[in-house]
Image (spheres, grey):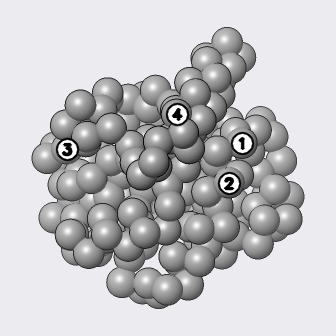
Amino acid sequence: MLKKTLFLLFGFFVFISGQASAQNESPPEDRLPGLKIGTAAPDFSLKDLNGNIVKLSDYKGKKIMLNFWATWCPPCKAEIPAMEKFHGEVGEDVVILAVNIDARYNVKAYVDKMGVTFPILLDEKDQVNNDYQILTIPTTFFIDKKGIVRHKYLSAMPIEIMREYSRDL
């Protein structure tokens, strides 16, 4: 629980800091903590909300936006409408996978209430969270068609950044 509280506090700090900046941008990507840009995205297998197994490697050859979030995270909640709008814009051109890091809560009810239509995956054992070295949420990775991490964004991401980063894949 302490780990989750620290995620929330750090995520909130990053969110507030981003809101205070004139441009609302994350720090330069090469200075962000955790998994580095240019590395191969670690493969994983997680269940979705229907109990189906989803593997990252199933999407090799596609552009992927991989988002880490939790239901109790205010910046995550603020980001979901932009992600949903982006999902509608890109159709099948970009796969959005949202990894919930705290599946103890009723994620399905939350997702239904928010009107989310992109895949939600449950990291019940924190394995993917650890593999991606998540220090704050939301954290989003943009993975190219070859499975390489090309962009990383900490905090709630504006749709303009989603559009920009997905074009570079």
Sequence-wise first label, 4 or 3: 4
Q: Position of residue 167 (x, y in %)?
A: 26, 75
Q: Which mark is residue 17?
A: 4
> What residue is rendered at 54% in x and 39% in y?
20
Residues at discs 4 and 3 in contact (Cβ within 8 Å): no
Mark 2 Cα-neighbour bin, 10 Å: few <14, some 14–19, many ≥20: some
Q: The residue under label 3 is which amino acid type?
A: Ile
Name the residue beneath numbered marker 3. Answer: 37
Residues at discs 3 and 2 in contact (Cβ within 8 Å): no
Mark 3 Cα-neighbour bin, 10 Å: few <14, some 14–19, many ≥20: some
> What residue is rendered at 45% in x and 48% in y?
22
Name the residue beneath numbered marker 2. Answer: 78
Q: Please state which of the two labelled residues, at mark 2 or mark 4, is closer to the viewer.
A: 4
Asked if residue 166 can be seen in this view, the reply is yes
Sequence-wise first label, 3 or 2: 3
Q: Which mark is residue 85?
A: none
Q: Between marks 2 and 4, how big is the CA–CA gap?
A: 15 Å
Q: Secondary structure at mark 3?
A: loop
Q: The residue under label 2 is which amino acid type?
A: Ala
Q: Position of residue 103 (x, y in %)?
A: 71, 40
